Image (tube, grey):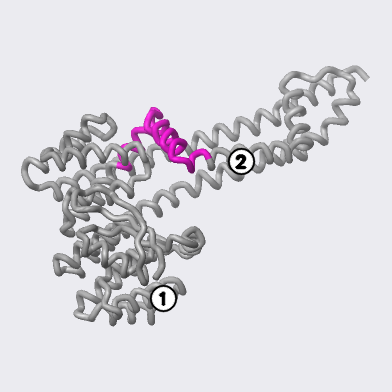
């Protein structure tokens, strides 16, 4: 027997966690289900950090995970038994980790465990959202439909990330080339003029002196600057890793003029899309909220969902308590409120997700459209200013009487 740490959602929709002994993680998941809980994770209490680090290094990419789930859904829909479908995926996969994952899932399924239980024991590849979706699909008797819905969600999220990454390639390349050119001028070109200016015996113009002092500092104190920057980044990373630091960072992000609006829209889209997917798979609203809460990257918005959970337990609705926080976009909450009143909450959540996904996409395109010329003008001005400052000094030296 080994000691496992677990997280689950109880019948009241509360997130609970604790420790339990069991032969393996699947046995712990089964005991939690028998107790009426919705298991989220179960992992070894000892050596847990080592296991999680190994799993993170081998984590499936979102596009690979979407393909894995899509293949499984197609095979199950075709009438293939679950263990046979997993065996087929393991045999056809060219990705070593995906192949091992399919083999281990097949072993758990052949041992009599449900697919959701097997997924819950694979924290490095699947999270609470995937487990909840599959468990609801199993309960409804339509596993293939739940897997297809889950695959669509993963593919949509992968597409958004790929579009963002592709859009950022050119600005990043432009900034790198321009920044590298400026550093090259300051570190290697400007020092060549120092001796010439020193022999002239004349006070240099202020812009030229600033450029020479900057180049001298970069040459002589570059290691100190790099060390200070590394220490500052490490300190900031450790601070943000704490609950208080992360909460303050997320709260500050929401208060930013333009970025705050973008963050709210992106989180609203994720919240609506995930909640619609869970409801469509048969997960009760109260049980779905803790799962969706873990999917939100902004902890301020995630903690606001606790108010909605309390209101639901008291017989209230979802939109009103979220509106009282003033954190979520008003239009999206109004649409959710209409969905609650008409009994079409899932459909309205899908519409909200589409609305804010389009809004986020349009906002990113506008930002990138402004960013590219701003980078060109800004870096061009710095490089041109550096060169002009040297030319001014050269002209001044040239005008000196011999």
Q: Quadrant of residue 402?
A: top right
Q: Which residue is more in the foreground, 184 or 150? A: 150
Residue under the point 28% across and 45% down: 269
Q: Which residue is mark 1?
A: 99
**Quick one: which residue is furthest to the left in this view?**
342
Report the residue marked by disc 2: 178
Q: Where residue 363 sits: x, y (%)?
A: 35, 38
Give the overall secondary structure of the magenta segment.
helix
In the image, residue 86 lies in the stretch drawn in magenta: no
Q: Earlier in the sequence, mark 2 or mark 1?
A: 1
Give neighbour class at mark 1: few <14, some 14-19, many 20+ (Cα, 10 Å).
some
Q: Is residue 323 left or right of residue 56?
A: left
Q: Residue visible at 26% across and 67% down?
A: 30
User: Relative to 369, is 218 on the left or the right?
Assistant: right
Helix, strand or loop at label 2? It is helix
- The reply to whether residue 34 is visible in this rendering is yes
In the figure, residue 28 lies in which quadrant?
bottom left
Residue 20, position in %: x, y? Answer: 35, 61
Q: Secondary structure at mark 1?
A: helix
Question: What is the magenta range?
Answer: 239-267
- In the image, 259 versus 178, the foreground residue is 259
Dots 2 and 1: beta carbons under 8 Å? no
Q: Is residue 265 magenta?
A: yes
Relative to 149, residue 16 above or below:
above
Residue at 28 percent of width and 72 percent of height: 72
Choose top left, top right, bottom left or bottom right for residue 330.
Answer: top left
- Report the residue that reaches farthest toward the right: 402
């Amino acid at each position: 027997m080994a000691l496992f740490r677990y997280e689950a959602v109880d019948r009241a929709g509360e997130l609970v966690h604790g420790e339990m002994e069991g032969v393996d993680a699947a046995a712990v998941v089964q005991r939690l289900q028998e107790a009426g809980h919705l298991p989220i994770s179960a992992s070894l209490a000892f050596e847990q950090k080592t296991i999680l680090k190994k799993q993170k290094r081998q984590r499936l990419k979102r596009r690979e995970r979407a393909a894995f789930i899509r293949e499984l859904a197609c095979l199950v829909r075709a009438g293939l038994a679950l263990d046979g479908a997993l065996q087929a995926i393991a045999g056809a996969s060219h990705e070593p980790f995906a192949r091992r994952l399919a083999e281990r899932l097949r072993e758990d399924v052949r041992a009599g465990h449900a697919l959701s239980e097997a997924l819950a024991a694979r924290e490095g590849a699947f999270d609470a959202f995937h487990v909840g979706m599959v468990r609801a699909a199993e309960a409804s008797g339509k596993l293939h439909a739940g897997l297809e819905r889950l695959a669509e969600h993963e593919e949509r999220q992968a597409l958004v990330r790929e579009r963002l990454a592709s859009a950022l390639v050119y600005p990043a390349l432009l900034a790198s080339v321009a920044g590298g050119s400026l550093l090259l001028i300051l570190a290697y070109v400007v020092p060549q003029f120092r001796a010439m200016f020193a022999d002239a015996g004349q006070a240099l113009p202020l812009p030229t002196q600033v450029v020479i002092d900057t180049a001298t500092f970069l040459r002589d104190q570059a290691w100190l600057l790099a060390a200070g920057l590394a220490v500052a980044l490490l300190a900031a990373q450790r601070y943000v890793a704490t609950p208080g630091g992360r909460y303050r960072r997320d709260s500050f992000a929401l208060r930013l003029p333009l970025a705050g609006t973008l963050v709210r829209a992106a989180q609203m889209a994720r919240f609506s899309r995930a909640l619609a997917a869970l409801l469509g798979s048969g997960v009760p609203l109260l049980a779905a909220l803790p799962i969706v809460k873990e999917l939100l990257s902004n902890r301020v918005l995630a903690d606001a969902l606790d108010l909605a959970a309390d209101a639901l337990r008291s017989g209230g609705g979802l939109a009103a308590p979220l509106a009282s926080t003033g954190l979520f976009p008003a239009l999206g909450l109004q649409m959710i409120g209409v969905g609650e009143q008409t009994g079409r909450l899932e459909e309205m959540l899908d519409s909200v997700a589409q609305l804010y996904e389009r809004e986020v996409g349009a906002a990113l395109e506008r930002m990138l459209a402004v960013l590219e010329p701003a980078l060109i003008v800004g870096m061009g001005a710095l490089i041109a200013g550096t060169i002009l400052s040297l030319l001014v000094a050269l002209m001044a030296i040239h005008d000196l009487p011999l």
